[in-house]
């Protein structure tokens, strides 16, 4: 199994704009459930700590294999989501690793 974790800081001049961006990002990624072969689990978390070094949103997902993760990266539904949320972020961090 491959775990794929992505964290974002979301753009927004006001708290309301930032909250709208977070909601849009969350909705877009949640729309992938059941649409990507090999995607076993997907969850989106929104930071509640509000500490200055925290990211705003995290995507935690599990794939059946490295090949499934690679296929996800090019899947039309994932590419759609990337287009929908691409302008929302000011920073993005990613970690992929194999789980025993």
Image (cartoon, helix red, strand yellow):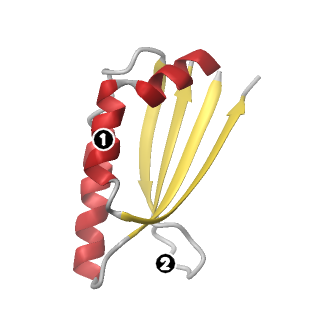
Q: Quadrant of the N terminus?
A: top right
Between disc 1 and disc 2, the foreground one is 1
96 w.r.t. 41: above or below: below
> Taking 56 as reference, is 76 left or right?
left
Give the tally of numbered discs: 2
Report the front residue among 70 and 15.
70
Alpha carbon distance from label 1 to label 2: 26 Å
Tag of residue 97: none
Does any portion of residue 60 appear in the rendered image?
yes
Judge the density around disc 2: few (<14), some (14-19), many (≥20) Cα neighbours within 10 Å.
few
Tell me: residue 92, above or below residue 27.
below
Residue 65 appears in the picture as rendered: no
Left or right position of 12 against 41 = left
Q: Residue furthest right?
A: 100
Q: Position of residue 10 (x, y in %)?
A: 39, 68
Kindly indicate the quadrant of the structure image that contains residue 89.
bottom left
Identify the residue shown where x is 63% and y is 21%: 66
Please rate how many residues cluster around mark 1, counting C-alpha atoms within 10 Å: few if below 14, some from 14 to 19, many from 20.
some
> Where's the C terminus, which quadrant?
top right
Where disc 2 sits, the SS reads: loop
For the point 27% across and 37% down, which residue is it? Answer: 80
Dot 1 falls on a residue whose secondary structure is: helix
- The residue nearer to you, when weighing 85 against 45, is 85
On residue 81, the disc is: 1
Residue hosting label 2: 50
Which percent across, then down, holds residue 71?
48, 20
Dividing the picture into quarters, in which one does residue 19 lie? bottom left
52 w.r.t. 9: above or below: below
Which label's residue is closer to the chain start, 1 or 2?
2
Q: Is residue 83 left or right of residue 96?
A: left
Give the percent coordinates (x, y) of residue 70: 54, 24
Relative depth, front residue between 64 and 51: 64
């Amino acid at each position: 199994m491959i775990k794929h974790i992505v964290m974002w800081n979301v753009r927004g001049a006001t708290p309301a704009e930032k909250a709208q961006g977070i909601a849009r990002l969350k909705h877009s990624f949640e729309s992938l459930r059941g649409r990507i072969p090999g995607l076993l689990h997907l969850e989106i978390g929104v930071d509640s700590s509000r500490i200055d070094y925290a990211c705003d949103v995290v995507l935690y997902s599990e794939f059946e294999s490295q090949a499934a993760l690679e296929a996800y990266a090019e899947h039309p539904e994932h590419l759609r989501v990337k287009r929908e949320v691409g302008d929302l972020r000011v920073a993005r961090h990613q970690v992929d690793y194999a789980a025993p």
